[in-house]
Image (spheres, grey):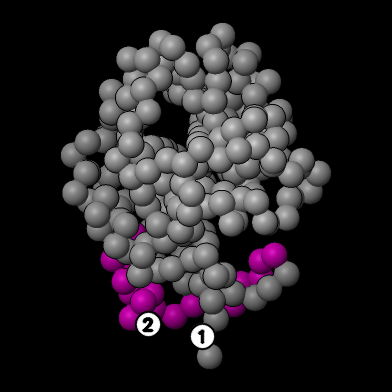
Amino acid sequence: MPIITAIDATTWQFDEEGVRFFLLAGTERALLLDSGMFTHDALDLARGLTDLPIELLNTHADRDHTGSNAQFDHVYMSLAETTNYYNSPAWGNAPAPTGAVIGIWDGQVIDLGARELEVIALPGHTPGSVAILDRRHRRLFSGDPIQRNGNIYMFGPQREMHAYVGSLERLLTRIGAFDEIYPCHADCPLTPEVIPQLIEGAKRVLTGAVDGEDFEIHGRTVSRVDVGVSAFLCEKRG
């Protein structure tokens, strides 16, 4: 059972073991941003908070963000995530998601009724990772790419550090549009100053300026490269 915290009267944060998701309500409908890892009844929990119709948007399709997706007959998501979404095995006893994917695009605005949410593409952690900018409340719900004191997954065929750096550099051009960042892992909330710190750290990883250490995860050994603000989990070199 996640711990549910009200950020304000129309915004809620759900915290599980190491992962979080969010519910945002407008005047006409509400939107769940991701649906949990071990939680499989996020829709029921959300219905206990609002009487509005509830839809689902995934920041990306990694399985620690789709635990309750089977409760929905459709989900908003970047179409670049569909290979991961439909073909990755479910975790634990989570039902496999089968609903339709409705594609979302960079720059698209989703209006919940007096609450406009802008989709910002952030490829790198996964090809279709997105952040959601809550324009009215000046908050960025960032998914996984932005973390402080976390481990950012950058190993495996989906991950690409060059794209990650480019995404965050582009996000810097929007830094005046939000005051707080709500990531899905590690410290929360964050201030925008974390973005240039992550860019600098990622560039150091790309140039080999910082060494990593062996790190065991999901039955494999990767390289954990600590850059201060966070650590990147990368493929081992050599």
In this view of the protein, can residue 197 be seen by the observer? no
Identity of the residue drawn at 41% across and 10% down = 27
Percent of width and height locating residue 80? 48, 54
Q: Residues within 10 Å of mark 2 (few under 14, many from 20)?
A: few
Choose the circle earlier in sequence order: 2 or 1: 2
- Marks 2 and 1, how far apart at CA: 10 Å
Report which residue position mark 1 lands on: 237
In this view of the protein, can residue 123 be seen by the observer? yes
Report which residue position mark 2 lands on: 208
Query: Badges 2 and 1: C-beta atoms under 8 Å apart?
Result: yes
Q: Is 203 contained in the magenta span? A: yes
Position of residue 12 relative to residue 16, above or below, is above
The magenta segment is 197-218
Q: Residue furthest bottom?
A: 238
Viewport quadrant of the N terminus: top right
Percent of width and height locating residue 141? 41, 38
Percent of width and height locating residue 47? 62, 15
Percent of width and height locating residue 108? 33, 36
